[in-house]
Image: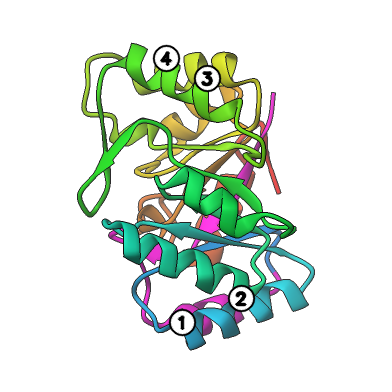
Amino acid sequence: MSSHFILMLTENDATVPDALEVYDGLRDSSVFYVGFKDIGLPVRSLKKLAQRIRADGRKAMLEVVATNREGELDSIRAALDMNVDYLLGGCNLEEALAMLQGSPIQYFPFVGRTVGHPTVLEGTMDEIVEDARRIASMPGVHGLDLLAYRFAGAGEPAELLRRVRKAARIPVIAAGSIDGEERVRAVIEAKAWGFTVGSALFRGMFGKDSLQAQINAIFQIDGVMA
């Protein structure tokens, strides 16, 4: 079992203000997938960040956390302009799919009812699993973005992740609040395609002094892959 580690240049569901400088300090890292949010920096700065990530042979991921329809659609337009490789999150599926049609962008929308900022996942486990099955059947959806550790309902996040993955039968990213080795191991055991880590790194929660050292520590966990 293995899962891709996705480095998020984010804290509190927003791109960190010095994301460009932070990324430049990590360009020799083993990280392959690098993500950021649609808020925290102006689009021109996010576009420059995406260009640097792609120029280094990595995959750029934009995660949409806008809390209203117009904000989400603006973020999708920005993703197209930035030429990111992956678009994560968002809830307005039909409109997003129409906008992304013909684009090479891989689309991983949110599963379930996501609310607030930082975003949390509401609903019952059964409702979320059924939503995952529905979304996964839609042409143009390449995977799912599941806020497993932001789940506000009854049940274990890892069990929710397992059930969603089995129901969807397409790649699932476990996003949000993965803040230590125990949760990394849990998402790997649940066979998530990938998992994101952002805030925990900027808060030093992987037990090392530098960001690079923490990233190295994550890669040392059995089953973590670039």
Disc 2 designates what residue? 82
Q: Residues within 10 Å of mark 1 (few under 14, many from 20)?
A: some
Q: Is residue 130 above or below residue 151?
A: above
Q: Residue at x 40, y 40 (%)?
A: 180
Element class at badge 2: helix
* Tag nearer the camera, 2 or 4: 2
Instruction: Look at the image and give the residue range highlighted in magenta.
Output: 1-28
Task: Report the label total.
Answer: 4
- Label 4, on which residue? 159
Q: Quadrant of the N terminus?
A: top right
Q: What is the secondary structure assignment of the residue under circle 4?
A: helix
| Residue nearer the viewer, 154 or 66 | 66
Instruction: Looking at the image, tell me whether mark 2 or mark 4 is earlier in sequence order.
Output: 2
State the residue at coordinates (36%, 51%). 205
Q: Secondary structure at mark 3?
A: helix
Depth check: 120 or 18 in front?
120
- Sequence-wise, the earlier of marks 1 and 3 is 1
Mark 3 closeness class: few <14, some 14–19, many ≥20 residues within 10 Å = some
Image position, residue 188 (x, y; %): 58, 27
Q: How far is disc 2 from disc 1 in space, using C-alphas?
A: 8 Å
Residue at the spot of label 1: 43
Q: Position of residue 140 (x, y in %)?
A: 66, 42
